[in-house]
Amino acid sequence: MARPLRFRHSPEAWSEGRVERQLLSSLQDNIGAEAVSPRFEAGGGWTTHRFEMDNGDVALFARRDDEAYWMGNTETPKALWRTEKYGWREVPYHVARWAQRELLATLHEEDPWLADYPHLSWFFLPVFMSKDGRDSTRAFFRDHAGGFPDVDRETALQFFEDLLHRGTLDPYRHTMSGKLGTSETVDRVRMSAAMAEFVAADLLTTAGYDVTPEIEVTTGHSLDFRAEDDATNVLVEVTRPQPPATRAANGPVAAIRDTAQTKTDGQLAAHGGGAVLFVDCSSFPDDAWRAVRDERPDVRHRPAVVYRVRPMSREADPKEASDRESGERRRPASRIEGYRKGSVPLDLDVAIEYVD
C-alpha cells in the first residue's frame, strides 16, 4: 500500500534534456504520459514540470542548480529510485507551495464539492491525491459523512473544516492525515476510528490543553496523545466502537465494553496504567447512544471518558462570513455528551456536557 504523498529529493543537476530522457520518456514507455504546462509559477528560481499520465496519474518536478524535487501519485522513474523522501515541511517553501497549488487545483477539478472545504482539502491532500487512496479517502467523506451516522455530508464536512481550520494539528499534518490510510477500498470502520483521533484532539484543545500525537512509551507502544498545560501532563488513548448493528456484540453497551477491552488488553495494559481512555461513540446512531448514556456502563479501564459528538448545522450569517474572512479559528458546531469513569485528570467541562 502506497503511503501519503511525499517529495523525493535528487541532489543532482537536471537539464531540460535529462528531464525528457530519464523522466518523461520513462513514463511514456511504461504507462503513457505527456508533459503539460504547470498551472502555477513556483518562484525562487525553480524550473517546474508537470506530467499527466493516461491513467489519470499526475507527477510534479521542480529543479534548480544542483538539486530537484519529485512528487507524484504514479510510478517513480528509475532515475529517482534511490532518492531520499521528505515531508511537506522539510522541502523548500517555494517547492511545497507550488506542489500544493498544483495538486489542490487538480483535486477540486476532479471533485468540485471539496472546494467548499479548503482546509479539509489542504490537510488531507497527501491522501486525497495519493496513489492508492485517492478514491477511497474522498469517498469516505463524500458518501459516509466522515464517519457520522444520521448527519448529512455538508454538516459533517463543515464540522471537520472548522475543526481543522483551528490549526491545532497543522504541525502534524503528515502523521495525522496518514491515519486515514491509502488503501484502495473504503474501510468505514477503520477510517471512522482514525477521525475519532481528530475529534479527541479538538476536545483537548477546546479544554485548553496543548496536544502532541503519537507518543512513544517505554514498552515500545505508542499512545495517541499527550495533553499538557502548566499543571498537567497526561497520556490519552482513543478508541471508537463500531455501531452495534455492524458487530457481533449484543447491543451498544456490550459494543463499547468489548471495544474498550481491546485497548485495555493491548497498549494500555502494556503501558501499565496512568493513561486516560477516550471512548468515542460518535459512530452510534441516536437510539444506541441513548442506551449507553442512560446506563453509563464501565469500560474495563479507569480513568475513562465515554462521549458522543454530533455535528450540528450552522446557519450562515454575516458574522460567520466575517469570521471566516478574518481567519478566526472557530470551534466546530456540535453537541457533545459524555460521562466519566474513575478520577479523570483532565478538566473537559467546557468541551463535554456530562450526564453523570
Image: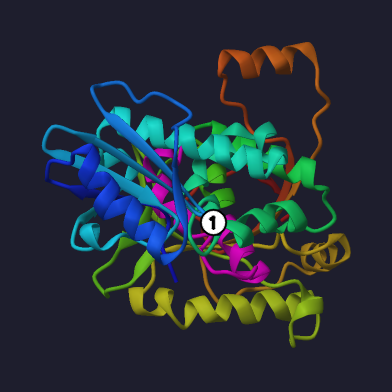
Q: Which residue is drawn at 65% across and 44% down?
A: 110
Could you tell me residue 300's position as x and y percent? 57, 78
Q: How crowded is mark 1: few (under 14 residues within 10 Å), some or many (20 or more)?
A: few
**Is 225 located above or below residue 108 in the figure?**
below
Which quadrant holds residue 235? bottom left
Q: Which residue is drawn at 46% across and 53% down?
A: 33
Q: Residue at x 79, y 40 (%)?
A: 312
| Tag 1 secondary structure | loop
Which quadrant holds residue 299? bottom right
Left or right position of 4 against 43: right
**Is 30 located above or below residue 264 in the figure?**
above
Q: Residue flagged by tag 1: what amino acid is it? A: Asp
**Is 341 located above or below residue 231 in the figure?**
below
Residue 207 seen anywhere in this rendered image of the structure: no
Q: Residue at x 47, y 83 (%)?
A: 265
Could you tell me residue 25's position as x and y percent? 33, 55
Instruction: Report which residue position mark 1 lands on.
Output: 54
Q: Quadrant of the N terminus?
A: bottom left
Q: Main secondary structure of the magenta part?
A: helix
Q: Give the range drawn in magenta.
A: 168-197
Left or right position of 44 against 200: left
**Residue toward you, 186 or 74:** 74
